[in-house]
Image (spheres, rainbow, N blue to C red):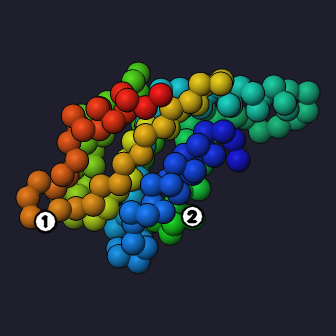
Amino acid sequence: MDNLSKLGWLNAEVLLNDTFVKGKYKPEETGLILANTNSSLDNDLKYYNTISDIPSPSVFVYTLPNIVIGEICIRNNFKGEHAFFIQDKFDAEFIYSQVNYLLERDILQACICGWVDVLGEDYKAALFLIEKNNAGAHVAFSPDNMNRIFNTIN
């Protein structure tokens, strides 16, 4: 497991440890919407350097973000919609709109969303668990709150 996968998996474990009741939703009702800025290209290049002198399949830039989602889904039996977006920077409005779309249309009932990024020695992760709120707004956690939390993380 590469560093990006470890960071995403560990943050998901911490997030779900005390806040998520497993079995509350069907596996297809829980999904993931994640993003980062580098698509783990840093890790892909490190891997490529370790195999440069032997025949090997191509290294695809988008492979490792998909592994992050796969590790989280396998561990927690999540089978709902998921995506890993590559963006210039953390964009809470975009993440909010994607999650809200899925909850509003009853595609998902719960979603882990946020940012998982590793570039060399620098890393930053902020994951949020959003559950459908049938009493009002579909996503009670606002982009302003996500930005405030993300920007206070060291």
- The answer to which image quadrant residue 133 occupies is bottom left
Could you say which is closer to the camera, residue 61 or residue 100?
Answer: 100
Is 42 placed left or right of 84 in the picture? right
Residue drawn at the location 20% of the way across and 52% of the way down: 139
> Number of callouts in the render?
2
Could you say which is closer to the camera, residue 154 or residue 138?
Answer: 154
For disc 2, the neighbor class at 10 Å (few under 14, some 14 to 19, many from 20) is: few
Residue drawn at the location 66% of the way across and 39% of the way down: 3
Identified by mark 2, the residue type is Ile
Whether the residues at callouts 1 and 2 have beta carbons within 8 Å, the answer is no
Is 146 placed left or right of 126 in the picture? left
Going from the N terminus, do you reach mark 1 or mark 2 first? 2
Residue 74 appearing in the image: yes
Q: Which residue is mark 1?
A: 134
Residue drawn at the location 51% of the way across and 61% of the way down: 73
Query: Residue 112 appears at what percent x and percent y?
Result: 39, 53
Q: Which residue is farthest right?
A: 53
Residue 28 appearing in the image: no
Q: Which residue is mark 2?
A: 74
Identified by mark 1, the residue type is Asn
